[in-house]
Amino acid sequence: MATTSTYTLVAEDIPVLVALLQVENSMMQLQGSPTNTDFNNLMTAADTLCRSGYPSSTGTPEVQTWVDGFFTTLATAQTTSVTTAGNSVSLVYAAWAFTQYYNAWAQINNPPGPMDSWLWCAFVKGPITFVKGPVTSSSMVFPGPWTLPTQPAAWATSVSASVKGVVYSASLDNFSSPETRTLNSFPGFWKDYINVPTAFTIWSLQSADLSGLLGLSSLADSQALFMLYVMVALTTSSASDQALVNNIANTPVSSAELPNSNFAQHLAYFVALYLNDPTGWDWPPEQISTLINSLAGAIPEGSAAATLLAAFTSQQQLFTADPAYPSDDPNNPGIAFQQRYSDVLGAINGAWPPASSS
């Protein structure tokens, strides 16, 4: 990452980053022997991400690089299963979206019937008015047409091309003739997974950003949230990245507020203060608590990042103990907000760069 990076997030980044964490967690689960559920989770997470408020011109450049990198790879990746080898992942994504549409359609039409090609047309173009065999479409209720993703550009273009290719294929051969298949057999597409560990560069980009942060002479208050996010993201990365995160998290740090503690506890505590600061983001406790929950939830089960997860647990205990936290701290009632802000950031930088002595 260029040395001109500020490693500073803005509020517009947060919904995108939360969605991106779910994508990375889902991709990690695809390694090894993925199940139908694992691939379904990735499609769900990718759909959420591309509709989560794509990084705007006012957002953080690193965030746009991460998102663009993920979707550019996804747009060009090919499925690897024996049955449909060579299909684009964007086609499988469209198939996943079609199952969501079919499920909604089946709930309001009884009996639902098979997934005929005419239903695919309704999925893409909206309600139809012609007759298919004994079924009159005018007697049915159709959900509104599916909205194609519009961002990022490479992904939107790939999905659009895949959808158009199926719409104008009368037999829908690309979908293994879904007009003869029911919803119960359709999830076989989830077996069309890609080689996640080698196909995506998002973790290497984030690892480089973490290295860039550690190369700074100190951590600015505005960079703390960025660092915490990257540490969480890399808990789904390689074993070496996970080990680095764990080493950073366990770096000894002590302050008046958190004596004889570690870097993870101090960083999570400071981020809560930073987001609550009335001169800055001025987030209410409920909003901060929700974000902390999202970060904790993105750390995979059995992760080596137990110390980082424990730091989030400590934060949630404080939110539960005192509705006014972090403006007030039930463990440090005699220390004012700004003093705690200064103390904790100072302690972090007193041990900077973390992991150097662990």
Image (cartoon, rainbow, N blue to C red):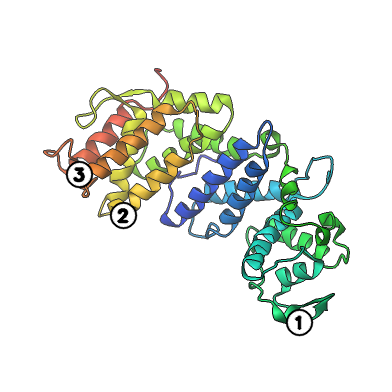
Separation of marks 1 and 2 at Cα, in angstroms:
50 Å
Provide the secondary structure element on which disc 3 rests.
helix
Query: Nearer the N terminus, badge 2 or badge 3?
Result: 2
Is residue 268 depicted above or below 261 in this figure?
below
Residue 165, image x and y in percent?
83, 63
Q: Residues within 10 Å of mark 2 (few under 14, many from 20)?
A: some
Query: Nearer the N terminus, badge 1 or badge 2?
Result: 1
Mark 1 or mark 3, whichever is nearer to me? 1
* Residue that badge 3 annotates: 338
Check residue 129 in the rendering and tell me which mark sits there, or answer none: 1
Q: Amino acid at mark 1?
A: Thr
Q: Amino acid at mark 2?
A: Trp
Check residue 283 in the rendering and tell me which mark sits there, or answer none: 2
Q: Amino acid at mark 3?
A: Gln
Q: Residue at x 47, y 28 (%)?
A: 245
Mark 2 or mark 3, whichever is nearer to me? 2
Is residue 170 depicted above or below 154 in this figure?
below
Of 178 and 154, the residue lying toward us: 178
